[in-house]
């Protein structure tokens, strides 16, 4: 085969890898969400993904975040869930909450199965009021990688609960 024919085939090959897109309108108080993930088979999706957050008030794109290994199952409506943290059961790909108790909504994004016993692990982003964007939190991400999945928040007592 000629190199002149091979190059267009290789370039087009990247376009053939289907991205699967999901929209979540009720996952967050502040944002509508679009998830683009690399692979979906049966009821499970995984692989590289982008998470686009849109401001609910203006409908403008607020921020795009990513995961090298987003992993989730689809519910009966063929959509991903959000904000479910069940030890030894379902843990959603996106968790919206105020993780640092500063009064603003933060987000945790599933990134593989690197927590205890191969459980789900999360990258945690907290809202930075100065930068007006979500920024990675090394300490909270470490908590969500070194324990059994995502931690829970107790907003009344301002505590994080890990297992």
Image (tube, rainbow, N blue to C red):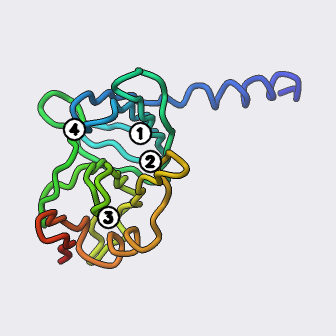
**For marks 2 and 3 on the same chain, the one whose residue lies earlier in the sequence:** 2
The quarter of the displayed image where residue 37 is located: top left
| Residue that appears at 47% across and 23% down | 60
CA gap between label 1 and label 4 equals 12 Å
Tag in front: 1 or 4:
4
Residue 128 location in percent, x, y? 47, 54
Task: Left or right? Give the position of 90 relative to 70.
Answer: left
**For marks 1 and 3 on the same chain, the one whose residue lies earlier in the sequence:** 1
| Residue that appears at 36% across and 61% down | 122
The quarter of the displayed image where residue 162 is located: bottom left
CA gap between label 2 and label 4 equals 14 Å
The residue pinned by badge 1 equals 39
Contact check, label 2 and label 1, Cβ < 8 Å: yes
Q: Could you say whether the residue bearing mark 3 is in a helix, strand or loop?
A: loop
CA gap between label 4 and label 3 equals 29 Å
The residue pinned by badge 4 equals 74
Residue 58 location in percent, x, y? 41, 21
Q: Could you say whether the residue bearing mark 1 is in a helix, strand or loop?
A: strand
| Residue that appears at 39% across and 35% down | 35
**For marks 4 and 3 on the same chain, the one whose residue lies earlier in the sequence:** 4
Residue 125 location in percent, x, y? 42, 56
Between 122 and 117, the one nearer to me in the picture? 122
The residue pinned by badge 3 equals 100
Q: Is residue 136 above or below residue 84?
A: below
The residue pinned by badge 2 equals 47
CA gap between label 2 and label 1 equals 6 Å
**For marks 1 and 4 on the same chain, the one whose residue lies earlier in the sequence:** 1
Q: Quadrant of the C terminus?
A: bottom left
Tag in front: 2 or 3:
3
Q: Could you say whether the residue bearing mark 2 is in a helix, strand or loop?
A: strand
CA gap between label 2 and label 3 equals 28 Å
């Amino acid at each position: 085969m000629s190199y002149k024919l091979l190059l267009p085939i290789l370039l087009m090959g990247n376009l053939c890898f289907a991205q699967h897109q999901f929209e979540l309108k009720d996952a967050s108080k502040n944002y509508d969400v679009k998830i683009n993930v690399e692979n979906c088979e049966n009821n499970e999706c995984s692989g590289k993904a982008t998470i686009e957050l849109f401001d609910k008030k203006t409908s403008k794109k607020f921020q795009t975040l990513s995961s090298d290994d987003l992993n989730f199952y689809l519910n009966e409506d063929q959509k991903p869930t959000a904000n479910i943290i069940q030890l030894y059961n379902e843990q959603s790909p996106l968790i919206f909450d105020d993780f640092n108790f500063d009064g603003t909504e933060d987000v945790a994004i599933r990134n593989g199965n690197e927590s205890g016993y191969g459980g789900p692990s999360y990258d945690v982003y907290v809202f930075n009021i100065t930068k007006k964007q979500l920024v990675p939190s090394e300490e909270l991400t470490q908590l969500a990688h070194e324990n059994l999945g995502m931690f829970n928040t107790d907003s009344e007592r301002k505590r994080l609960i890990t297992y």
